Amino acid sequence: MARKLGVNATQRLALIKNQASALLWHGKIETTEARAKEVASYVAKIITLAVNTYTDTVETEVKVVDAKGKETTKTLVKDGNKKLNARRKIMTLVNDLQEVKGFKESKPDFKKRTKAIK
């Protein structure tokens, strides 16, 4: 039986999704034992999905003509149908934390404030 974690269903799903994203991106999180158990089962399903479809690729050969007119053959490796479906499913289950405005972009403002404070 799933734990309620003291919040309603939508908040619980958002909490688990956020913590799972943080766990996958950073490798560890600090949380309560009950939340950790819920997140562990959620992340285990995501990892299993990714591992099972890892080798599903399709190789195709493409002829490419360069600026000098020389024709060469290149091999393109694309994701197969199962891997593409798994990737899309994982994208719905995990928040992309790299899209959030990072420290690097706000660094000049931070430097100005610390100099003003000192």
Image: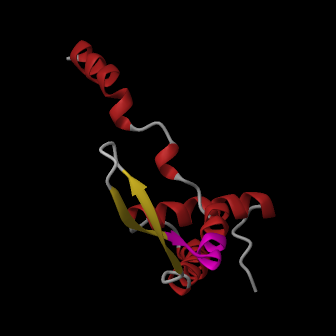
**Residue nearer the viewer, 28 or 95:** 95
- Point 37% across, 30% down: residue: 105
Q: In which quarter of the image is the N terminus?
A: bottom right
Rendering coords of residue 48 (x, y %):
55, 84
Residue 2 lies within the magenta run? no
Residue with the most extreme right position: 9
Q: Give the range drawn in magenta.
A: 78-86
Secondary structure that dominates the magenta span: helix
**Residue nearer the viewer, 104 or 37:** 104
Toward which corner of the image does residue 109 lie, by quadrant?
A: top left
Count the marks: how many? Answer: 0
Rendering coords of residue 19 (x, y %):
55, 63
Residue with the most extreme top position: 116
Q: Quadrant of the C terminus?
A: top left
Seen in the image, is 39 located left or right of residue 105?
right
Residue 81 lies within the magenta run? yes
- Point 66% across, 72% down: residue: 85
Rendering coords of residue 94 (x, y %):
59, 62
Rendering coords of residue 9 (x, y %):
80, 64
**Residue nearer the viewer, 30 or 27:** 27
- Point 74% across, 61% down: residue: 7
- Point 67% across, 62% down: residue: 92
**Residue nearer the viewer, 4 or 80:** 80
Seen in the image, is 78 located left or right of residue 105?
right
In this rendering, the answer to whether 93 lies above or below 101 is below
